[in-house]
């Protein structure tokens, strides 16, 4: 049984047994709980911590754990109505009010209830995460001399050099001095947006695109302007029009295994993106989030846009989080010219630096033989899970898996077109009642959505059997709502 499940189960048992004790009475010792429930000391410690957080138990160092004494007074509810005005008021002249809507991101980060199959997540299932390799890397990192001291503001040189080789490719077009270590991809993306575009400015984005990018842009006071994507990536003919019409000086794109469509930017469009951006005097933020999620049997990967850029047009960002664990929040920003100083300044102001032990853990991980083995493993597993989900869709939901379904050579999701008129909210709600969590397509569009969609993840489920069952449950939800899927 996984540790997280053991903790939840023990906390449930202890919660039910609390009525056997009077307020203030001592609970059994940790040793007694370990022996009684046959769990580890860590499980007992974490379960008690849950009860402490709920106000049911108090702990006293050296004395043990006690049932909490219930409060006799009900606290007076605070009157926070004044905040409505304070948070809504915008200074005179502001044309783009800042909003912070994280609902599209939260929908894919939320942990579903027990028994619900997770087809909406954006991370590898724990069975695919290199937990043993991460634990070993963390243990070795903690023993490195100076690991717990203050790291360089730009990041540990060894890690920056590794990222430079990964981003620049075999041609060696990037130096370690061109790289900043960041606290994951989302942090890097927010820093890049703030560094390149001033509040109120337009920013060109792919349509559809990652909801976390739209949320970060709007929270920074930027105006996302959508540019359509097809099976070959962003429509570069429309990109030039969008630059002219909006006056934007920034385009954010995911050229490889784009989220949510899975598209790979075609070779001729790669060149055109850089040409159009240079002509507009604009930056391209390249979000290379999924390069290490390539599927077994996929064609050779194209180089990064950064590797082909000689004029400082591209600001590149990537992360180790997607191919490893949600908690290994280590990424990189790469750029050339004055924009690199701006990126560095914003990151220092926001967070000073990325924790040294976490950087050292990343160095240990990517330098170990386990890293290459892990990448080979997930390459094969993701391909198998993708094919299983496609087969299940064709069997149970043939109308959604027709000729228009794009099967990506990498990444972790399928972008499924729903019949016209489908109520996405009703379907996601019905799917949840049927025992499967899926992501509605609307949050992926910066403006009006041209059609209803679902994003289905094949990485967050526990295996091929769960994927097949998840699609079957989605079919049941469609039948309940009368959505034509045959």
Image (cartoon, helix red, strand yellow):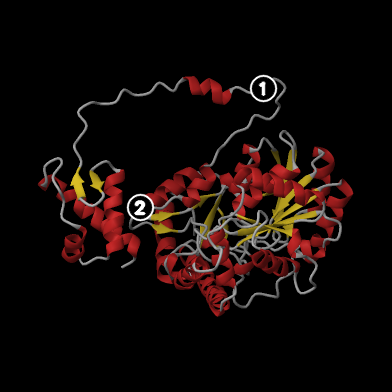
Q: Where is residue 95 in the image (x, y as percent from the top left)?
A: 71, 27
Q: Answer with left or right where residue 99 lies relative to residue 336.
A: left
Q: Is residue 370 visible?
A: yes
Q: Which residue lies most toward the right here?
A: 279
Q: Out of 368 and 415, give the one closest to the viewer.
A: 368
Mark 1 vs 2, N-terminal side: 1
Q: Position of residue 109 (x, y in %)?
A: 48, 51
Residue 168 falls in image quadrant: bottom right
Of marks 1 and 2, the one in the foreground: 1
Residue at label 1?
Answer: 91
Give the crowd class for mark 1: few <14, some 14-19, many >=20 residues within 10 Å: few
Q: Is residue 464 above or below residue 447?
A: below
Q: Answer with left or right where residue 152 lies relative to residue 54.
A: right
Residue drawn where x is 44% and y is 64% of the image? 461
Q: Out of 174 and 273, give the one closest to the viewer.
A: 174
Q: Can residue 226 be seen in this view?
A: no
Please tell me whether mark 2 sits on a helix, a strand or a loop. loop
Picture disc at residue 394? none
Mark-to-mark CA distance, 1 and 2: 43 Å
Picture disc at residue 113? 2
Q: Is residue 421 above or below residue 254?
A: above
Give the crowd class for mark 2: few <14, some 14-19, many >=20 residues within 10 Å: few
Residue drawn where x is 46% and y is 48% of the image? 427
Residue 400 falls in image quadrant: bottom right
């Amino acid at each position: 049984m996984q540790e997280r499940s053991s903790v939840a189960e023990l906390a449930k048992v202890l919660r039910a047994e609390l009525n056997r004790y009077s307020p203030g009475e001592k609970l059994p010792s940790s040793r007694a709980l370990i022996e009684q429930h046959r769990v580890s000391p860590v499980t007992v410690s974490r379960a008690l911590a849950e009860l402490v957080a709920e106000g049911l138990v108090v702990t006293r160092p050296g004395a043990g754990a006690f049932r909490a004494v219930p409060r006799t007074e009900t606290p007076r509810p605070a009157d926070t109505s004044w905040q409505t005005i304070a948070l809504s008021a915008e200074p005179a002249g502001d044309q783009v009010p800042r909003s912070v809507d994280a609902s599209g991101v939260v929908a894919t980060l939320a942990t579903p209830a027990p028994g619900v199959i997770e087809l909406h997540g954006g991370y590898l299932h724990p069975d695919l995460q290199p937990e043993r390799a991460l634990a070993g890397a963390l243990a070795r990192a903690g023993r490195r001399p100076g690991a717990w001291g203050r790291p360089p503001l730009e990041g540990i040189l060894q890690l920056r050099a590794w990222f430079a080789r990964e981003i620049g490719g075999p041609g060696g077009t990037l130096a370690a001095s061109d790289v900043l270590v960041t606290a994951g991809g989302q942090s890097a993306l927010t820093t890049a947006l703030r560094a390149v575009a001033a509040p109120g400015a337009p920013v060109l984005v792919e349509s559809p695109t990652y909801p976390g990018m739209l949320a970060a842009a709007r929270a920074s006071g930027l105006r996302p302007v959508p540019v359509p994507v097809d099976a070959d990536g962003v429509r570069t003919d429309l990109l030039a029009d969008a630059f002219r019409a909006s006056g934007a000086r920034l385009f954010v794109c995911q050229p490889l295994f784009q989220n949510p469509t899975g598209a790979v930017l075609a070779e001729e469009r790669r060149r055109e993106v850089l040409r159009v951006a240079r002509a507009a005097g604009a930056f391209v933020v390249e979000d290379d989030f999924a390069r290490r999620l390539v599927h077994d049997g996929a064609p050779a990967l194209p180089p990064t846009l950064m590797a082909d850029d000689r004029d400082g047009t591209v600001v590149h960002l990537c992360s180790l989080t997607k191919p490893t664990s949600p908690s290994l929040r280590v990424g990189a920003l790469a750029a050339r010219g004055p924009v690199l100083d701006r990126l560095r300044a914003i990151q220092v102001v926001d967070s000073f630096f990325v924790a040294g032990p976490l950087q050292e853990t990343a160095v240990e991980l990517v330098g170990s033989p386990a890293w290459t083995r892990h990448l080979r493993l997930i390459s094969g597993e993701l391909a198998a899970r993708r094919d299983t989900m496609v087969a299940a869709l064709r069997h149970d939901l043939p109308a959604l898996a027709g000729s228009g379904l794009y099967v990506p050579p990498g990444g972790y999701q399928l972008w499924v077109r729903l019949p016209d008129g489908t109520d996405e909210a009703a379907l996601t709600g019905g799917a949840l009642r049927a025992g499967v969590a899926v992501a509605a397509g609307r949050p992926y569009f910066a403006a009006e959505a041209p059609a209803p969609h679902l994003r289905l993840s094949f990485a967050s489920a526990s295996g091929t059997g769960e994927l097949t069952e998840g699609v079957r449950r989605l079919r049941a939800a469609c039948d309940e709502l009368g959505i034509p899927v045959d």
